[in-house]
Image (tube, rainbow, N blue to C red):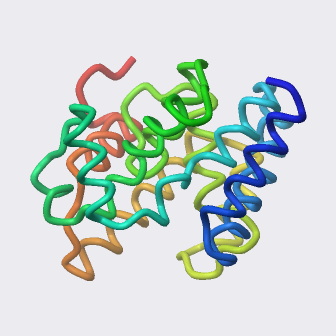
Amino acid sequence: MKNTDMRKIRKAMEKAQDAKRYEHTLGVAYTATALAMRYGASLKDAEMAGLLHDCAKCLTDEKRLAICEKHNISINEIERRNPFLLHAKVGSYLAMDEFHVTNSDVINAILNHTTGRPGMSLLEKIIFIADYIEPNRKQAPNLSQVRKMAFIDLDQTLVVILKDILEYLESTEGEIDPMTRKTYDYYTGKGEGNE
C-alpha cells in the first residue's frame, strides 16, 4: 500500500469518526508503529491496522447488526445483546470491502483487537496492546507500568491487560466475551493448545 493510500485512510477515518475517536485512532496507529519498530514487525501493516481498527466504532448498533446479517458475519448471543461489541468484526469486513485490504494479518489484527485470540500473530498482539496503551488512554489500571512493559515483553503485557479487562468486567458485572477468557487462559498456560 502506498503512502497516498495511508493518507486516504487517515482522511476517511477523520470524516467517519468523532474528534475523540479519531485522536484515539491516531494514537493507536502511532503506538502500533512504535511497537512494530521495537519488535521487528511491518511498520506499514501496524499503521494500517491501527488506523482501521475502530473504523466501525462510530456506526450505530443497528447498522453493525445489519452489516453482519447482510454479509453472514456470525453474531454470538453476547454480541446480539451488546451490538457495540461487533465493531471489530464489522471493522475487519469494512477494511476488506471499503479499503481493499487484502493482507490477512492486518484483517485479523482488526478482527481480534478487542478480545484477542489464542495463538495471536505479532501484529495482532501489537494492535491489541496499542489499543490499550495509546497516549490518549487515561483510565486503565496499572497504565504506566503496562506502557513500559509493552516495550519489554509483549506476551506478559498481553496477560496483564487481559487480566485487567476480565477483572474490570467481573467487578462491573459486564458480559465477558468467551474469547477474552480463552485468550487469557491460553497465554497463562491454562488453555487448550498451549505449546
Place residue 33 in its image quadrant: top right
What x and y, as percent, mark residue 67? 30, 45
The residue closer to the viewer here, 167 or 90, is: 90
Residue 50 appears left or right of 5: left
Place residue 172 in its image quadrant: bottom left
**Which residue is painted at 27% across and 33% down in the image?**
71
Query: Quick one: quadrant of the N terminus?
Result: top right
Residue 95 appears left or right of 149: left
Q: Residue pushed farthest right?
A: 3
Query: Quick one: quadrant of the C terminus?
Result: top left
Q: Is residue 175 above or below residue 85?
A: below
Q: Residue pushed farthest left?
A: 77
The residue closer to the viewer here, 123 or 94, is: 94
**Which residue is painted at 26% across and 63% down in the image?**
62
**Which residue is painted at 32% across and 58% down in the image?**
63
Q: Is residue 80 above or below residue 164?
A: above
How many badges with numbers are in the image? 0
Place residue 156 in its image quadrant: top right
Residue 111 appears left or right of 62: right
**Which residue is painted at 47% across and 61% down in the image?**
57
